[in-house]
Image (spheres, helix red, strand yellow):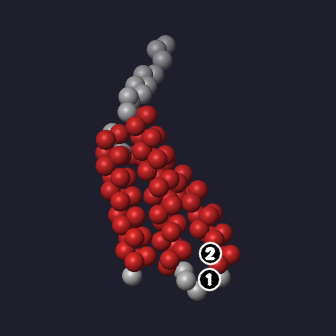
Amino acid sequence: MTSPKHPPIRRDWLSKILAGTLLGFTLALGCSGLLVLALPQLPLPVKAQLAMWVVMPLWLGVLGGGFAFRDGRRAWLWLGGATALVLDLLVVARLS
């Protein structure tokens, strides 16, 4: 019997992990800030807890989703663009 051939491990897994970790955390923090600005009617303690607890699921979702990209360069580009967009929205929302 021959053992089944497994596909080789891609070499860009480290860049995908780093993109998901670094940019994913920044993206999750930005989304948390947008959530705080979108819910002004909530009391401050509730808003703070909600903002704090939403970061981890978003971050882990982005980190896991980073492996869906074809290569590490695309992960950095797409996640970097999404992070820049969210942070720009946060700045515009704070200024208005």
Left or right? Give the position of 88 relative to 3: left
Give the residue displayed 50% in from the left and 53% down from the top.
Answer: 25
* Marked residue nearer the N-terminal end (2 or 1): 1
Residue 58 appears in the picture as rendered:
yes
Identify the element where label 2 is drawn: helix
Q: Residue furthest top?
A: 1
Give the residue displayed 67% in from the left and 76% down from the top.
Answer: 46
Identify the element where label 1 is drawn: loop
Q: Please state which amino acid type lies under the numbered disc 1.
A: Leu
Q: Position of residue 35 (x, y in %)?
A: 51, 73
Q: Are marks 2 and 1 in contact (CB under 8 Å)?
A: yes
Q: Please state which amino acid type lies under the numbered disc 2.
A: Lys
Residue that carries the numbered disc 2 in the rendered image: 47
Up the image or down, 64 lies above or below 89; here it is above
Q: Residue furthest right?
A: 45
Q: Residue furthest front?
A: 95
Give the residue displayed 40% in from the left and 37% down from the top.
Answer: 15
Residue that carries the numbered disc 1 in the rendered image: 42
